[in-house]
Image (cartoon, helix red, strand yellow):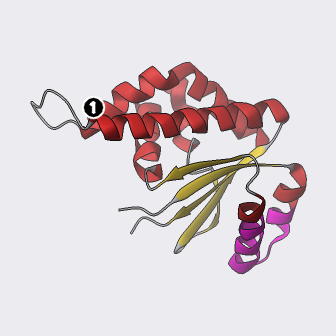
């Protein structure tokens, strides 16, 4: 199973500092600073990997939703290992926000429900479905806010082993 995941809408200064970092420990230090401030953050908890996979599946099925591929795990990998850090630059954030808005909670809910339902079973785990849909909605709101403010979106998550 995966560990906790969080998204941050970051400003140009923070994005620049990430770009100047020469080693993973410098990036992780910056992440620690973001976590201490806890501004413009969206916690996906341990559901991040399943939410990301649901988004990637939708992106693969529908070209209009292609940007969903990077809705959780960003386009640019900054670190890998126990802690994965990725970023979507402002232009990618705009595309992701538009795709999330187009798909909406009902599209996510239907796709996620299909993932958790077994063959021939009438329903999946409604509590899990509600929990992940709530996190999807928070993620969608963060991307919309970031896109409107011209911010990049940083993902920090425990690696899925």
Q: What residue is rendered at 29% in x and 34% in y? A: 126
How many marks overall?
1
Q: What residue is rendered at 43% in x and 32% in y? A: 58
**x%, y% of residue 93?**
70, 38
**x%, y% of residue 99?**
59, 27
| Local secondary structure at mark 1 | helix
Q: Which region of the structure is painted magenta?
A: 17-33
Which residue carries the number 1 mark? Answer: 114
Which of the two residues, 133 or 120, is positioned nearer the viewer here? 133
**x%, y% of residue 71?**
57, 41
Magenta highlight: main SS: helix
Q: Magenta includes 161?
A: no
Can the viewer see residue 57 in this picture?
Answer: no
Q: What residue is rendered at 51% in x and 23% in y? A: 103
Q: Quadrant of residue 106?
A: top left
Q: Is residue 9 left or right of residue 99?
A: right
Can the viewer see residue 100 in this picture?
Answer: yes
Q: What residue is rendered at 60% in x and 23% in y? A: 101
What is the crowding at mark 1: few (fewer than 14 residues within 10 Å), some, or many (at least 20)? some
């Amino acid at each position: 199973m995966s560990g906790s995941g969080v998204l941050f809408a970051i400003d140009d200064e923070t994005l620049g500092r990430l770009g100047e970092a020469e080693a993973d420990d410098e990036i992780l230090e910056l992440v620690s600073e973001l976590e201490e401030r806890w501004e413009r953050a969206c916690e996906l908890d341990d559901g991040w990997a399943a939410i990301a996979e649901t988004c990637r599946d939708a992106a693969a099925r529908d070209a209009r939703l292609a940007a969903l591929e990077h809705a959780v795990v960003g386009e640019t990998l900054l670190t890998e290992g126990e802690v994965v850090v990725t970023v979507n630059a402002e232009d990618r954030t705009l595309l992701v926000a538009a795709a999330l808005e187009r798909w909406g909670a009902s599209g996510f809910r239907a796709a996620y429900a299909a993932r958790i339902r077994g063959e021939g079973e009438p329903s999946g785990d409604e509590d899990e479905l509600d929990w992940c849909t709530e996190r999807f909605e928070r993620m969608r709101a963060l991307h919309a806010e970031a896109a409107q403010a011209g911010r990049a979106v940083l993902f920090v998550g425990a690696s899925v082993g």
